[in-house]
């Protein structure tokens, strides 16, 4: 090997490492930009219906069959509300995933 070829061989890693650092810096900057854009996303407020509580309405002195019917109706209302809120959240989450990085 000649002296010039030895120098060329020794300089190859230097050139390659310089290119790698440029790519890493560019990737890091792109990641930070995506992170900043995602952090700026504002989620909509939770629907008021999702915050409501259900009560059975059973009162002292109600007949047992009436109390059971009232409690069952309250459970049906709450289950429907939970389903609506879960559907709303699932749609929101799917929309955010479809949008991808901003």
Image (spheres, grey):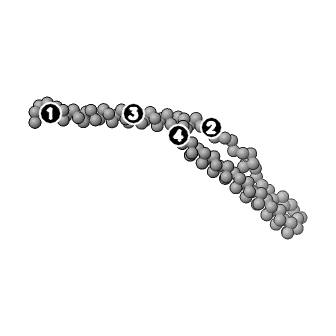
Label 1 vs 4, first from the N-terminus: 1
Location of mark 3 (residue): 25
Tell whether label 4 touches label 1 (CB within 8 Å).
Answer: no
Tell whether label 1 touches label 2 (CB within 8 Å).
Answer: no
Secondary element at image label 4: loop
Label 3 vs 4, first from the N-terminus: 3
Label 2 vs 1, first from the N-terminus: 1
Marks 2 and 4 sit apart, C-alpha to C-alpha, by: 14 Å
Position of 92 relative to 38 (above/below):
below
The numbered disc on residue 101 is 4
Q: Is residue 28 left or right of residue 56?
A: left
Marks 1 and 4 sit apart, C-alpha to C-alpha, by: 47 Å
Q: Quadrant of residue 40?
A: top right
Label 3 vs 2, first from the N-terminus: 3
Q: Is label 2 or label 1 in front?
A: 1
Q: Is label 2 or label 4 in front?
A: 4
Q: Is label 3 or label 1 in front?
A: 1
Marks 3 and 1 sit apart, C-alpha to C-alpha, by: 31 Å
Position of 33 relative to 66 (above/below):
above
Location of mark 1 (residue): 5
Secondary element at image label 2: loop
Location of mark 2 (residue): 42
Residue 58 or 12: which is nearer the viewer?
12
The numbered disc on residue 71 is none
Marks 2 and 1 sit apart, C-alpha to C-alpha, by: 59 Å
Marks 3 and 4 sit apart, C-alpha to C-alpha, by: 19 Å
């Amino acid at each position: 090997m000649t002296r010039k070829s030895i120098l060329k061989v020794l300089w190859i890693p230097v050139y390659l490492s310089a290119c790698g650092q440029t790519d890493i810096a560019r990737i890091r900057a792109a990641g930070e930009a995506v992170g900043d854009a995602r952090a700026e996303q504002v989620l909509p407020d939770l629907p008021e219906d999702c915050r409501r509580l259900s009560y059975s309405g059973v009162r002292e002195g109600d007949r047992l069959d009436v109390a059971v019917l009232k409690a069952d109706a309250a459970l049906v209302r709450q289950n429907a509300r939970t389903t609506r809120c879960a559907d709303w959240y699932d749609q929101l989450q799917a929309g955010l995933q479809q949008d991808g990085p901003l």
